[in-house]
């Protein structure tokens, strides 16, 4: 697909070719722990969905290094404009698995009060994690607007905007990159080329020789990297963020990776992904790659890996247990945060609906007069 060699830092044997990530030992372990957490969160969500306890989930197996490598460069004063396959970015910056599980169950503690689909997280802290939107590519121009606004205000804010190979076919991609190029908005565009847009292979997504090359048309650098190499992702993101902070404008990064699972829990990839492709990428697992690197610098052993996996599994299972116990949002919260001042006709229609729900007993009606 892309004829140019992607940027690589971690060699197959775990050695590193001349890049200093400046990550401390603790930070390296944190990157590793977060990648493992993403994978375990997926495994547990798949079981929760298959047993009918949550409605839906989106797997990240295979793309963990791209998410975590990029997130590791961002400051908490920056903005993340993620795709639905990016929750590892939030985990990296300290969002707890419990907060994420509240969303998966859509319960009363969920940041979005159960009004979003599972996996469509939004967090205001510890990092600004923009509400994930399902319509593909819509967040791209929004992130450019946010970045440009920050620039006008003289703030030192960079937006990291992540989307897939399929996202490059959206109108948002073209208008967003064009605007960012012209106005030198401080944005890093991270295209996660994971080979598929649901069942559409990347060869049918574009007639060009790849995605990084498209940057030229918008007057910005385009960089092709190995997305399963956490340090290569970090290096390319660092350079792009530096450019953005220096007022030099946006960069488009194309990270080559692979979606090792289905598109979502509603998908069966064995019906369309060739087996030899799955085997090829199984040998290039981003977590195993990073383990080799960590082992080479004396930070990893199979025993350490097993202990960390068990610890993370228990933490995420406990988060799921707790989130499952919390009740659904009260019915009357459907109007919270919608109006500064509730229009009278909405107020009376809402009250009538909630009174009906109370009489019928077929929905949780909350525990007070509407609106609370
Ligand atoms: C505008 C729009 N069109 C179609 C869809 C249906 N859809 C959901 S995910 C998806 C594939 C996106 O693929 P990609 O951008 O490569 O991201 P990936 O899922 O591979 O991470 C599609 C077509 C949608 N959500 N929004
Ligand atoms: Mg894709």
Image (cartoon, helix red, strand yellow):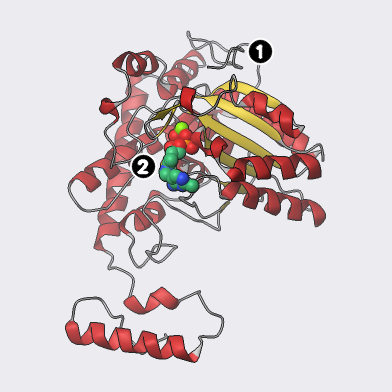
Q: How many marks?
A: 2
Q: Is residue 229 visible?
A: yes
Q: Does label 2 point to a residue whose CB lies under 8 Å from ligand 1?
A: yes
Residue in view at x 57 percent, y 16 percent: 2
Where on the picture, by quarter, is residue 326? Answer: bottom left
Residue 311 at x, y = what percent? 32, 38
Q: Foreground residue, 192 or 78? A: 192
Q: Foreground residue, 21 or 232? A: 232
Q: Residue furthest top?
A: 13
Residue in view at x 44 percent, y 77 percent: 335
Q: Is residue 235 visible?
A: no
Say which residue label 1 marks. Answer: 18
Where on the picture, by quarter, is residue 159? Answer: top right
N-term-proximal mark, 2 vs 1: 1
Packing grade of label 2 (10 A; few <14, some 14-19, many >=20) is many
Q: Is residue 235 above or below residue 58?
A: above
Tell me: 19 left or right of 350.
right
Packing grade of label 1 (10 A; few <14, some 14-19, many >=20) is few
Q: Does label 1 point to a residue whose CB lies under 8 Å from ligand 2?
A: no
Say which residue label 2 marks. Answer: 58
Q: Foreground residue, 107 or 211? A: 211
Q: Is residue 364 above or below residue 308?
A: below
């Amino acid at each position: 697909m892309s004829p140019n060699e992607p940027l690589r830092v971690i060699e197959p044997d775990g050695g590193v070719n001349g890049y200093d990530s400046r990550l401390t030992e603790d930070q390296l372990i944190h990157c590793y722990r977060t990648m493992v957490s993403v994978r375990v969160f997926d495994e547990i969500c798949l079981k929760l969905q298959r047993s009918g306890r949550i409605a839906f989930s989106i797997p990240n197996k295979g793309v963990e290094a791209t998410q975590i490598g990029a997130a590791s460069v961002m400051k908490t004063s920056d903005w993340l404009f993620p795709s639905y396959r990016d929750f590892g970015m939030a985990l990296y910056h300290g969002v707890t698995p419990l907060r994420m599980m509240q969303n998966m169950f859509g319960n009363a503690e969920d940041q979005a009060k159960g009004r979003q689909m599972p996996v469509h997280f939004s967090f205001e802290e510890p990092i600004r994690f923009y509400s994930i939107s399902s319509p593909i590519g819509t967040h791209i121009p929004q992130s450019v607007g946010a970045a440009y606004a920050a620039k006008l205000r003289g703030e030192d804010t960079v937006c990291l905007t992540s989307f897939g190979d399929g996202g490059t076919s959206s109108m948002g991609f073209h208008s967003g990159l064009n605007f960012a190029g012209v106005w030198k908005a401080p944005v890093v565009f991270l295209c996660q080329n994971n080979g598929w847009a649901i069942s559409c292979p990347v060869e049918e997504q574009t007639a060009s020789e790849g995605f990084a090359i498209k940057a030229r048309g918008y007057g910005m650098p385009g960089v092709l990297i190995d997305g399963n190499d956490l340090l290569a992702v970090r290096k390319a993101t660092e350079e792009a963020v530096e450019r953005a902070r220096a007022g030099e404008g946006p960069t488009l990064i194309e990270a080559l990776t692979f979606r090792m699972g289905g598109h979502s829990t509603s998908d069966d990839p064995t019906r369309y992904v060739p087996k030899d492709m799955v085997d090829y990428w199984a040998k290039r697992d981003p977590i195993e790659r990073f383990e080799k690197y960590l082992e080479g610098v004396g930070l990893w052993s199979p025993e350490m890996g097993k202990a960390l996996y068990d610890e993370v599994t228990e933490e995420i299972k406990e988060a799921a247990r707790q989130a499952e116990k919390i009740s659904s949002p009260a019915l009357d919260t459907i109007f919270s945060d919608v109006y500064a001042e509730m229009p009278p006709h909405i107020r009376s229609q809402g009250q009538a609906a909630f009174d009906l729900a109370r009489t019928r007993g077929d929905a949780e009606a909350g525990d007070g007069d509407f609106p609370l």
